[in-house]
Amino acid sequence: MTREFAIVWAHKGRLLEGFVNTIGLCVLATIIALVVAGPVTIALMARNRPISMLARGLVDGMRCIPFLLLAYIIYYGLPTLGIRFNNWTAGLSALVVYNASYMAEILRGAWASLPREHIDAGQAFGFSGWRLYRRIILPPILMACVPVLGNQTIQIIKDSAFLTIIAVPELTHEASAIQSMYYVPFAAFVGAVVLYWLLCRIVETLVGLIERRAEKRR
Amino acid sequence: MRAYDYFSLLQGAAVTISLSLTGILLGVPLGLALALIRWARVPLLSGAVAVYVSVLRATPLVTFILLVFFALPNVGIPIDPVPAAIAALAMNTSAFNCEIWRAALVDFPKTQLDAATAAGMTPGLAFRRIVFPQIWRASLPGLVNEMTLLIKSSPAIAVTGIVDITRAAVRIGAQTYEPLPPFLVAAALYFLVILGFVRAQRLIESHMDRKFGFA
């Protein structure tokens, strides 16, 4: 057993490379998904029926299928329609599309419970259009959603492990590579689990810090 | 897609449903047991459960199944794909279920427990007659939500060679060179499975509502 861990330790560079890729992928996916989720939320709340129904269809569709299926659709399915990705961009797009839908639903929930007077007051002060969203509607929604969005970020980290199946060189993929080369499954995957756990802890700590800052500014 | 392809997708659905259900049937009571250990603050065990829950909740299901399937034989415990998949699904969901049960237990009014003790109930009887009938109803929405999340991460079991809905769709796509139709049928199958769980929850709740006047 110690020999196994020694082998994994000797190849820690490879495991850390996968870890760094997982972090990069997840940070990018979280930021882009959050940016995409904004307009989707606005579309969900739109009074225009066709627009809101289109957004509703996208969000509900994503919430009904497994992440891996979406990754397969983007990686193997879309090329038959002439849209091509490499495994990295396919993985990132899948993470973004899938999680933006969940985030939009989270934001919609917070928006629906935002008091109408808050928006009325904003409009009375002359805010309208984009400035109304940016200054009046989005900030309290985002702040109210920080803990749930933190959970969604952890979900992104865990979804990203599926991307090993389409050969994205992330953490689980590198652990698999080390284990298949030296047959050290226990040490390799325990190493990966510890790193995932560490990453989730970091996210939880960050979320806690943001929450406390938001509380102070209120 | 030929008729046989639809048939193999349905076979995949049977695999996804049966393995997930087995995982749920083991994971829900296991989660309750873990939650009770933490709730009762059993020395040592309580801390171990906290670590178990924290690590499993942070571990991707794919990574965990790879660990169970490849590492157990390595440490002298031979395991087949199906038991490995069930064990991984059950352990994964038990960690989340533990937190759902625990939230309901923490919210449970202590005064009711005091009343039960005053009425001469043993802790076991008080749990069966007073605590459990209330916390399972409070936990039901969270538990069903976790069940749908488990279904959505269940394609991870394919790394052991098990052919579930997603893997069946990939195979058909590789044979026919037209991956989109089987993927869309697979998506529809998942939709139906998840709808089934949500419907079952509604049925149970409305049944409870009729029987007791509240859900």
Image (spheres, coloured by chain):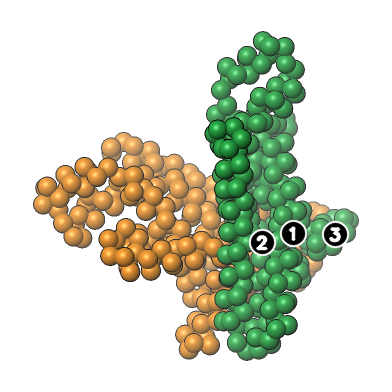
Residue B110 percent coordinates (x, y): 58, 20
Of the image marks 1 and 3, the number of the one nearer the N terminus: 1
Hey, what amino acid is under mark 1?
Leu
Question: What residue sits 87% from the left and 55% below the top?
Answer: B77
Where disc 3 sits, the SS reads loop
In this view, the mark in front (1 or 3):
1
In this view, the mark in front (1 or 2):
1
Q: CA distance from mark 1 to mark 2?
A: 9 Å
Q: CA distance from mark 2 to mark 3?
A: 19 Å
- Residue A163's place in the image compared with B69, above or below, is below
Residue B94 percent coordinates (x, y): 68, 45
- Residue B178's place in the image compared with B211, above or below, is below
- The quadrant of the picture occupied by the C terminus of chain A is top left
Residue underneath mark 2: B154
Q: Which residue reaches farthest front?
A: B210
Looking at the image, residue B77 sits to the left or right of residue A137; the answer is: right
- The tint chain A carries is orange
Residue B133 percent coordinates (x, y): 65, 31
Q: Pick whichever, B57 or B70, lies toward us.
A: B57
Residue underneath mark 1: B19
